[in-house]
Image (tube, rainbow, N blue to C red):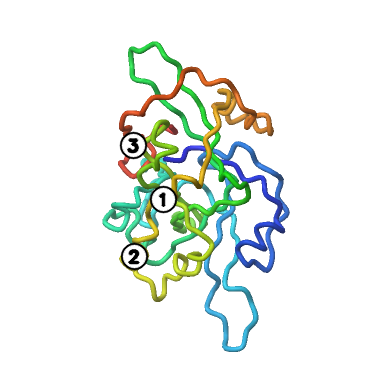
Amino acid sequence: MCGRFALTAAPEELMELFGLLEAEDFPARYNIAPTQPIIVVVASDRAKPGSNLPERKALLVRWGFMPGWVKDPRKFPLLINARSESAVGKAAFRAAMRHRRILVPASGFYEWRRPAKGGGESSQAYWVRPKGGGIVAFAGLMETWSSADGSEVDTAAILTTGSNKVIRHIHDRMPVVIQPEEFARWLDCRTQEPREVADLLTPAPDDYFEAIAVSDKVNKVANTGPELQDEAVPVKSPQPASPNRHRNEDDGQMSLF
């Protein structure tokens, strides 16, 4: 799953990677948490013939997916992740999988290795980043929720899949990564049905990420500095993580991690 991530790249880097005409001037963010605004990349509206406008644009949305049919958001679970294997069959995500697929830029994400209960071992946080640095693009879904008074909120969730070999000892789920050469196909909801992009919903290659043990400072949303990514001595040598069921994926449950 993905319960916290970071985006520390400059707007110019986003513009170059995603082919954007512009991107808001935003500060480096080292501890992005659910319900906070995040930057996402979407396909632009269909351009007129001969137009030289870019095919993509960046938007600010709330991290926490809200289907359009929800009447009272206070009674609906916070959906920050969606399981890629089943999203197209879920009422909450079905329409977005067909019509509103997005990219979520990140510099990396945080994950926690949770020990078995009763073992006396503490949880260990990890900063997971691309080995070569730079920006990673997570697959995501977007929905605009409208309240009874007519106000609208753009919301998003990050798609997850089973973990690769590097992440498996920490957690059994990880965000889906879309490679640059597949940006156009993933975002093309006009001609690409969910079944035609299903091959993209797989774990990143084993050599794509590196996982660095960090302190538990990242547990607190109020901590937002670069020191969150400083390497720390792991609490204990990692062992394979047991399967987890988390209360903020698409199972209708609520905890943040």
- Going by the numbered disc 3, the residue's amino acid type is Gln
Q: Is residue 67 above or below residue 131?
A: below
Q: Is residue 221 above or below residue 178?
A: above
Residue 16 in picture, x, y percent from top left: 67, 63
**Marker disc for residue 159:** 1
Image quadrant in which you'd find residue 243: top left
Say whether marks 1 and 3 touch (CB < 8 Å): no
Q: Residues within 10 Å of mark 2 (few under 14, many from 20)?
A: some
The N terminus, quarter of image: top left
- Going by the numbered disc 1, the residue's amino acid type is Leu
The C terminus, quarter of image: top left
Which residue carries the number 2 mark? 194
**Marker disc for residue 216:** none
Q: Is residue 117 above or below residue 196?
A: above
Secondary element under disc 1, as helix, strand or loop, is strand
Q: Is residue 202 left or right of residue 126?
A: left
Image quadrant in which you'd find residue 94: bottom left
Q: Residues within 10 Å of mark 1 (few under 14, many from 20)?
A: many
Q: Residue at x 46, y 55 (%)?
A: 139
Q: Is residue 233 above or below residue 173?
A: above
